[in-house]
Amino acid sequence: MKLPVSAGGDANPARGEGAQDRMNQKAFASKLYYGSCCFVLFFIAAAASFNGYYDKWHFREAGTSASMQGASFDAMVDGAAARPFVYRQLLPMLANWIDRRVPEQTKDRLFAAKDPGGAPLRERLFSSPVAQSRAYFLRYWIVYAAVFLFAWISVYAMYLLCKSVGYAPATAALSAIIMVLLMPYFMSGGGYLYDYPELAFFALAAWMALNFDWWWMIPVAALAAWNKESFLLFIPALYPLLRRRSSRIDASIGTGVLGLICAAVYCVLRSHFQHNPGGTVAVHLMEQIQTIPHPLNMFSPETTYGMTLIRSFNPLSLALIAWTLWRGWRSLPRAIQRHAQIAAVINFPLYFLFCNPGELRDFSLLYITFLLLLAANLTEWAGGPTTATQLSG
């Protein structure tokens, strides 16, 4: 006896399984394609951004137009830089550690390597005099590669963060690319080898705060504080993000423990370099006050991406940033708004007290806020939901 087939059923199970397999293959092919596109686009964006930074500032070494004696590459890797710059030791110590473990014979071969035309490879790669030095060339290559790698990581971290907040993958990708391409403009008045790692750690920490328990962030916090002490100041702004997936007590404990870890790393570095010239912080309040009667300083020329324009810290840039804030603020989830408020309360006073006038990069605690404001505005432009879907409320 033949049983009747229900109206919604499939008379041929094999055909149904085949259709499901084709759907799975199509979904896999789509993920592979878009993942490959992101890989290439993120690499290109990171490379362009890093090139914009490097052409503008190099590593502040002697013999370049951006030379800065107290924070030059050789002084940083030798541990002789001025405080507080010398505290930012993640990449210099990494380069020193690798350099000590590479045999001298290998270094000699690398130093003497030539391109197909017979010219020294190091001269083909770098114009910096420090990169031509036998004592520093390998460490220079390591730091160069590491800074670019962190620029690339930062794009991925920002992309993942935007997706975690609830923005569409295309919006998340475009927001991350725009943000990394803006970095050389944010480096108006100064740019350093620890700036891209700082951005990467901020984005990675915010993403992890939304997706993992706080103890998974311990190694990230330690490395981030080793890179720059600003991460200690970023920790309180992570509390609203940690609070999204944990109780008030757990979020408070996590914020406190992460802060103590960053403080411990900073104290070790501060003690180790206590005899270096300079001070724990550099106070620039008087310079900030003295610039007020001279607004034309904002229109001084500066070259970024090969184009000589006015400095990035100018009325037009500030107006665009304010407009981006005004248009996107109400679309941000409440947790992100609270994160932004805490970061702003910490960052603005510190900027006027301890930062050189006109350096947008010194508002780095607000990088994540600006990234998500970009995503919110792009979503509205594309006609998507006015509020990010996953963290709304």
Image (tube, grey):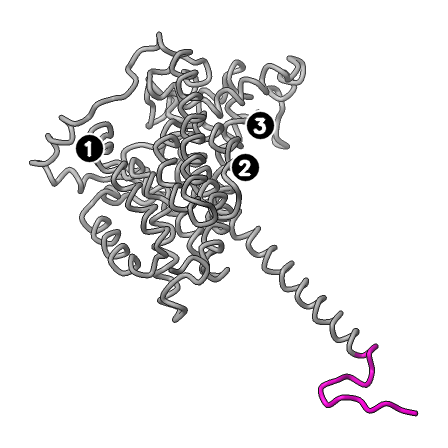
Considering only vertical position in the picture, is 328 above or below 56? below
Q: Amino acid at mark 3?
A: Leu
Residue at image location 39% in from the left, 49% down from the top: 179
Residue at image location 30% in from the left, 40% down from the top: 303
Image x and y of residue 74, in percent:
43, 17
Identify the secondary structure beneath mark 2. helix
Q: Amino acid at mark 1?
A: Phe
Q: CA distance from mark 2 to mark 1?
A: 34 Å
Image x and y of residue 292, in percent:
10, 36
Q: Find disc 2 in the rendering and name its residue.
A: 216
* Foreground label between 1 and 3: 1
Quarter of the image that includes the N terminus = bottom right
Q: Find disc 3 in the rendering and name its residue.
A: 121
Q: Find disc 1 in the rendering and name its residue.
A: 352
Question: In the picture provided, is 273 more to the left or to the right than 359?
Answer: right
Of the residues under marks 3 and 2, which one precedes in the sequence? 3
Residue 62 picture quarter: top left
Residue 261 visible to the viewer: yes
Identify the secondary structure beneath mark 3. helix
Residue at image location 44% in from the left, 27% down from the top: 227
- Does residue 13 show up magenta in the picture? yes
The answer to whether the residue labelled 1 contacts the one labelled 3, judged by CB atoms less than 8 Å apart, is: no
Q: CA distance from mark 1 to mark 3?
A: 45 Å
Considering only vertical position in the picture, is 366 above or below 31? above
Image x and y of residue 147, in percent:
48, 33
> What are the residue bounds of the magenta stretch?
1-15
* Foreground label between 3 and 2: 2
